[in-house]
Image (cartoon, rainbow, N blue to C red):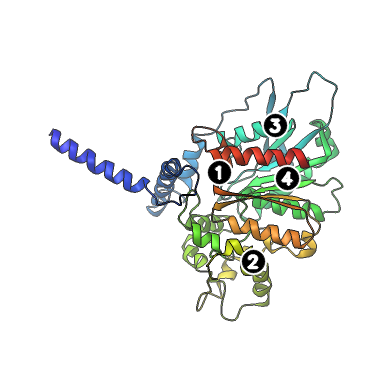
Amino acid sequence: MKRSILIVAILLSIAAAYYIYLPLPSTISEPWKLMFMDSILRGVMHLSFLAHDLGLSRPFDIAKYAASWDEIKGPQSSPAIRVTDTSFGGVQAQVFESTAAADQEPRLKRGVVYFHGGGWTLGSGKMRTYYFQCWSMAEQLDGVVISIEYTLAPEARFPDQYNEAIQASKHILTVEVLSRYSIDPKRVAVSGDSAGANLAAAVAQQMALDNSAPIKFKVQALLYPTLQALDFNTPSYQQNGHIPILHRPLMARFWLEYLNGDPNLVTSLLANNHATPAPSQEIVAAKVKTNWTKLLPVAFQKNYKPIVPLHGDPKLLEKLPGLLDVRAAPLLAETKVLKAVPPAYIMTCEHDVLRDDGLMYATRLKEAGVDVTVDHYEDGFHGCLSFAFGPFRFSVGFRSFRNYTHWLKENL
């Protein structure tokens, strides 16, 4: 009996080690910790997709349920930071206000409108990582951080999240709201990470063009943004397709959830099947704006080659018209639009499938005459800034958060 238990224990240990172990580049931050953390996340996602395949739930339901365990229950203030639940233009939000100088004469503060990541499908500003991030931002900036709780897929699909982001931003950028929180109307930033950075970039473009909004964002800060879904074979997608915590097929799944596409189209997206032998004029114009052979610095192109399918699927764009919609893919914006947007901070990570989205956008912004700061982390991975807090704290997480808040201090 004891021998049988020992054999089972050994087999389980081998299976666990096989599941946890991933060959990772030696340059990535704290690889063993990342492997362990990623094995938990992959396990949750695999379970979530399995339940969907068995007809028990929707694709991301179990992942959402697991993420809800990490949420802070109700606003929790302190003598230094006041946290309140509220809404702006009907969109739920949490406000983190620094009260450091509450006993002094009233003064105007910095303000940041923040959109959390999670593939437009997962996450919440109430999750501990985002909660403590926004709390720390308000403390470090001695300002006000407004974390927007936009509706997630599948309850909302594109352009719903975009519309909510615009609606909340317009409502916040009014004299009434800014004065309520003692925010300086000349020092308001829009920011976000991953899918939240996608929304932040799209909001920055639209608000810059909106003549009905006299108050504008001073700067935009985009953390490892996803900005296009026309090319899933950029050098960073090819290099980092199986690197934690954002694997290439999962990013395609997120885009399909956002754009209300059939999950079975993942393979088509990953193969760049929109690129047919006789592409439309619209596709040709879009490809110029995502042409990494022209937009990426040579050092990041390495020895990778563009992937072009032999045949393609001419109906893919009919099924997913959002692929060419600039509201979903801010990298596709016209140069005249980019000229109007505020100065940008763009964080990129070497070991991230989305690295090249951020770098290409930085090039296009610079070509349009926009002041851009690219903050690149050679040991970084997708989502690393969120791991400046909590039990899975990474050194690159702490460094990236420190540099991000320092840039906001200096430029806001």
Q: Quarter of the image for the C terminus: give it.
A: top right
Q: Secondary structure at mark 4?
A: strand
Closer mark to the observer between disc 1 and disc 2: 1
The answer to whether residue 368 is left or right of residue 302 is right
- Tag 2 or tag 1, which sits nearer the N-term? 2
Q: Residue at x 50, y 39 (%)?
A: 67
- Tag 2 or tag 4, which sits nearer the N-term? 4
According to the image, label 3 marks what residue? 140
Which quadrant of the figure has residue 103? top right
| Mark 1 neighbour density, 10 Å: few (under 14) some (14–19) many (20 or more) | many
Closer mark to the observer between disc 4 and disc 2: 2
Could you say which is closer to the camera, residue 24 or residue 316? 24
| Mark 3 neighbour density, 10 Å: few (under 14) some (14–19) many (20 or more) | some
Closer mark to the observer between disc 3 and disc 4: 3
CA distance for labels 4 and 1 = 20 Å
**Count the marks: how many?**
4
According to the image, label 4 marks what residue? 190
| Mark 4 neighbour density, 10 Å: few (under 14) some (14–19) many (20 or more) | many
According to the image, label 2 marks what residue? 290
Dot 4 amino acid type: Val
Which quadrant of the figure has residue 357? bottom right
- Eyeballing the image, is 247 above or below 385? below
Dot 1 amino acid type: Cys
| Residue, far bottom | 278
| Mark 2 neighbour density, 10 Å: few (under 14) some (14–19) many (20 or more) | many
- Tag 4 or tag 3, which sits nearer the N-term? 3
Dot 2 amino acid type: Thr
CA distance for labels 3 and 1 = 19 Å
- Tag 2 or tag 3, which sits nearer the N-term? 3
- Eyeballing the image, is 126 above or below 333? above
According to the image, label 1 marks what residue? 384
